[in-house]
Image (cartoon, rainbow, N blue to C red):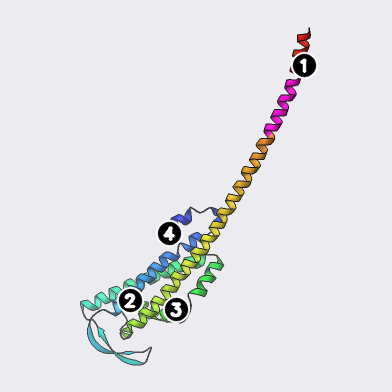
Amino acid sequence: GSADRPAARMPPRAGAGGHALAEMDPADQRSGAARGLRLAALNFPGTTVTVFNPVTGLSTTTSVPAGAGRKRRDALTAAAQQARLRSDAALADFRENAPKSAVDAYDSTVTGADVNSAEKYLDTFTAQPTFPDSASGTSATKLDAALSGRLDLMRGAESALYEHRTQDLEKLRDDDVTALEIRVAVLGVLLLVAVGIATAMARTLTRPLSVLRRGTARL
């Protein structure tokens, strides 16, 4: 993907962090897509009915589509399930390939009540490729708040990791510049030494010739 190409151009000594972080962007994008699809499925218009919510133990009045509307709602749910699976796969690649410090930083950032609540919603809404009737009474506001909160934390973690990665690469660049300056200075010294040796050798060779010419002139 486009996010992988800059990482592929990094020198080997830059480590595998760039390739691992490249997985963060698609994970965030697909998580965001899944959020929108779930909300669209939940808010799909239909007939008003009373539904018992086993999570809360309460009965709520909600809108349940029928016929073609149910099929469209199921299609949105199936798409949300696929988006979640792709997001989870990208995160798994990140965990497998990223340095331990990056994984620990992500885990310490993407945590808390919103994340726990979002994970429960994810399990409920994406367990099957069809919309679960038991979730019909779910509050769209609470669902949006939980999923948006988790997504914001994921994006914040990605931003922080990229910033840290940029600082590491800048240090490598500074080290390269310093090494280049040292090499140039060494080459300059060697050049001066070579010029000095060449000059000394030239003088050594020209003295006997000068003596010979003066002796020949006297004769």
Name the residue tied to disc 4: 3
The reply to whether callout 1 and callout 3 are in contact (CB within 8 Å) is no
Name the residue tied to disc 1: 211
Name the residue tied to disc 2: 38
Label 1 sits on a secondary structure element that is helix
The furthest residue to the top: 219
Q: Which residues are magenta?
A: 194-209
The reply to whether callout 1 and callout 2 are in contact (CB within 8 Å) is no
Name the residue tied to disc 3: 115
Residue type, label 1: Val
Q: Give the Cα distance between marks 4 and 2.
A: 26 Å
- Residue at point 74% right, 17% down? 210
Label 3 sits on a secondary structure element that is helix
Residue type, label 4: Ala
Q: Is residue 127 above or below residue 99?
A: below
> Does label 3 or label 2 sit earlier along the sequence?
2
Q: Give the Cα distance between marks 4 and 1.
A: 75 Å
